[in-house]
């Protein structure tokens, strides 16, 4: 099979348009899949694209999330109401991944995240104040995903997504005082979770429209804690500038002389997280819903690299008090078709 430059560029941007869940949703304490698996129009929304049979792609995605900062008195007041509220200076994650095209319609991916929460702190009721738990970092839970395109071409069609999260992350991190941190603060959850979703895309003249949904069913993990189920759904619009390629047929083969191109994109994402359950008790103050708008750009090079940058802000949030509402999110990814 002959592969064009355009298909190789799609393989590279396979990783460059991630987010997800995870960049993970702004409410989540643990990273999920970044959305590796399609040439969607943004950093979180996936498209129906799959890699060509026998082709592979590798990538790295970095996400930096800044949440609203609550005062010591606010955290202490919530603790007095038996709400385990907490804050961080920021949450950062890095995800490395590898994808392989089993067939032209089926792509398998594997991802491994690293998570860091800076200056974790939570409210204390008596005496009123804040317990400064320190920085928390470590390997997160790996994800294995399969995307199967059931209809259409690479740019237009419908694909189904399924997968599993493995309990590979660190689960025994301690606070600065030597206390075992709660499960929600650990880099890994200790649970086996399932993912189900779908992605669709079409071209509207020079504009590409993509939409995707991904649901995570969580199970009980470390410290008898079951984190809330999660849902991420969104749409993205993108426009490509400067794409061009030529094919020479003098020797009977295709020789690609692709040129670099730019994609500008915008996406709207809804993120929902259910309440978590600890030792059989549902914590009512956990979970919530947020709607984010993200804009960014992606550079696709002739050599098969793809570099994506994106910045997102929430336009609506209903976050229960255990979590701090998000302020903004930055994403940077680099990918290469192999």
Image (cartoon, rainbow, N blue to C red):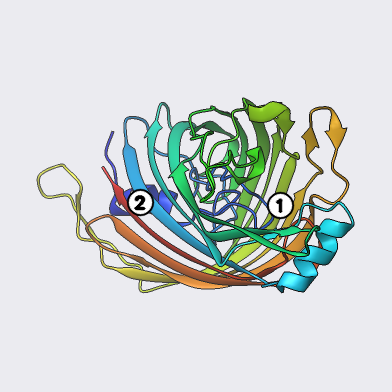
Which quarter of the image is occupied by the C terminus?
Answer: top left
Q: Residues within 10 Å of mark 2 (few under 14, many from 20)?
A: many
> Is 337 situated left or right of 185 in this image?
left
Residue 88 location (% of width, % of height): 60, 63
Which of discs 1 and 2 lies nearer the camera? The answer is 1
What residue do we see at 50% from left, 72% from top? 296
Does residue 132 lie above or below 103 as drawn?
below
Determine if residue 326 is in view. Answer: yes
Classify mark 2: helix, strand or loop: helix
Classify mark 1: helix, strand or loop: strand
Residue 50 location (% of width, % of height): 47, 40
Per the rendering, the mark at residue 233 is 1
> Is 51 situated left or right of 177 in this image?
left
* Residue occupied by mark 2: 12
Residue 69 location (% of width, % of height): 67, 73
What residue do we see at 61% from left, 46% from top? 185
Q: Which of the pair 258/193 is nearer the observer? A: 193
Between marks 1 and 2, how big is the CA–CA gap? 23 Å
Does residue 90 lie above or below 212 as drawn?
below
What residue do we see at 37% from left, 31% from top? 53
What residue do we see at 38% from left, 33% from top? 100
> Is 58 situated left or right of 176 in this image?
left
Residue 263 location (% of width, % of height): 45, 69
Q: Residues within 10 Å of mark 1 (few under 14, many from 20)?
A: many
Determine if residue 207 is in view. Answer: no
Q: Dividing the picture into quarters, in which one does residue 205 lie?
A: bottom right
Which quarter of the image is occupied by the N terminus?
Answer: top left
Q: Which of the pair 247/64 is nearer the observer? A: 64
Q: Which of the pair 11/116 is nearer the observer? A: 116
């Amino acid at each position: 099979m002959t592969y064009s430059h355009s298909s190789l560029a799609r393989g590279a941007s396979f990783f460059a348009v991630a987010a997800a869940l995870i960049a993970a949703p702004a409410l989540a304490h643990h990273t999920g899949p970044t959305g590796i698996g399609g040439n969607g129009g943004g950093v979180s929304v996936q498209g129906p694209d799959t890699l060509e049979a026998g082709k592979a792609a590798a990538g790295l995605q970095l996400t930096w999330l800044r949440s609203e900062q609550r005062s010591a008195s606010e955290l202490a007041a919530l603790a007095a109401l038996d709400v385990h509220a907490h804050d961080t200076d920021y949450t950062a994650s890095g995800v490395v991944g590898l994808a392989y095209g089993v067939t032209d319609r089926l792509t398998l991916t594997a991802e491994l995240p690293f998570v860091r929460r800076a200056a974790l702190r939570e409210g204390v009721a008596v005496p009123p104040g804040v317990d400064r738990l320190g920085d928390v970092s470590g390997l997160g839970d790996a994800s294995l995903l399969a995307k199967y395109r059931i209809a259409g071409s690479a740019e237009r069609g419908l694909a189904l997504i399924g997968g599993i999260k493995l309990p590979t992350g660190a689960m025994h991190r301690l606070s600065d005082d030597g206390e075992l941190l709660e499960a929600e603060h650990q880099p890994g959850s200790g649970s086996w979770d399932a993912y189900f979703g779908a992605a669709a895309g079409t071209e509207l003249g020079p504009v590409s429209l993509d939409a995707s949904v991904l649901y995570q069913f969580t199970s009980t993990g470390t410290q008898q804690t079951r984190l809330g189920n999660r849902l991420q759904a969104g749409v993205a619009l993108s426009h490509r500038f400067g794409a061009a390629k030529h094919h020479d047929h003098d020797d009977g083969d295709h020789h690609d002389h692709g040129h670099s191109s730019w994609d500008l994109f915008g996406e709207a994402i809804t993120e929902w997280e259910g309440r978590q359950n600890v030792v059989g008790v549902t914590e009512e103050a956990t979970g919530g819903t947020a709607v984010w708008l993200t804009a960014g750009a992606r550079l696709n090079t002739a050599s098969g690299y793809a570099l994506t940058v994106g910045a997102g802000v929430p336009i609506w949030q209903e976050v229960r008090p255990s979590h701090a509402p998000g302020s903004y999110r930055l994403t940077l990814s680099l990918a290469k078709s192999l």
